[in-house]
Image (tube, grey):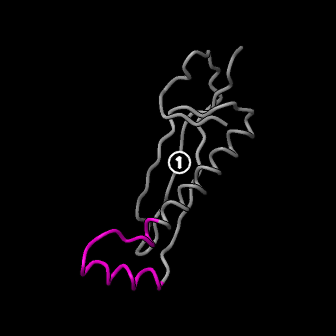
Amino acid sequence: MKLISIESYPGKEIEVLGLVKGTIVQTKNVGRDFMAGMKTLVGGEIVGYTEMLNEARQIATKRMVDEAEALGADAIIGVRYGSSQVMQGAAEVVAYGTAVKLVE
């Protein structure tokens, strides 16, 4: 499955199948919270949170791709990501785009 962030598929005609998305709500764990609190004292990257958000993006992307495959899509165009805090200690990550079939 090709994933592209632009709004068209270069060199190909497309048939739009519809919006597809994948979401996950990921929580922090106590160990990460403690280490993050310590890191705020000295500054720098909070690696545990970076890893958590990377994992959440991968899961959201897979869920989006699964939805596109169920529609018979060849690609997803206009891929975007978003995130928000849904409660203390939990973040939602969403991946979304337009599922398309490539026309020969």
Q: Nearer the viewer, residue 13 or 70?
A: 13
**Residue segment shown in magenta:** 30-50
The residue positioned 61% from the left and 16% from the top of the image is 12
Left or right placement of residue 40 versus residue 104 in this view: left
Residue 13 sits in which quadrant? top right
Vertical side of 6 occupied by 34: above or below: below
Residue 11 in percent (x, y) is at: 57, 15
Of residues 58 and 64, the one drawn nearer to the viewer in this rendering: 58
Residue lying at 47% horizontally and 42% vertically, measured from the top left: 80
* Figure quadrant of the N terminus: top right
Q: Is residue 72 above or below residue 56?
A: above
* In this rendering, position of residue 74 left or right of residue 34: right
- Tag 1: residue type? Ala
Location of residue 24 in the rendering, given as x and y in whole percent from the top left corner: 56, 60
Residue named by callout 1? 95
Position of residue 90 relative to residue 3, above or below, is: below
Q: Is residue 92 above or below residue 3?
A: below
Looking at the rendering, in which quadrant would you find the C terminus?
Answer: top right
Majority SS type along the magenta span:
helix
Q: Is residue 6 magenta?
A: no
- Secondary structure under tag 1 reads strand
Q: Position of residue 14 (x, y in %)?
A: 62, 19
Answer whether residue 45 is magenta in the image: yes
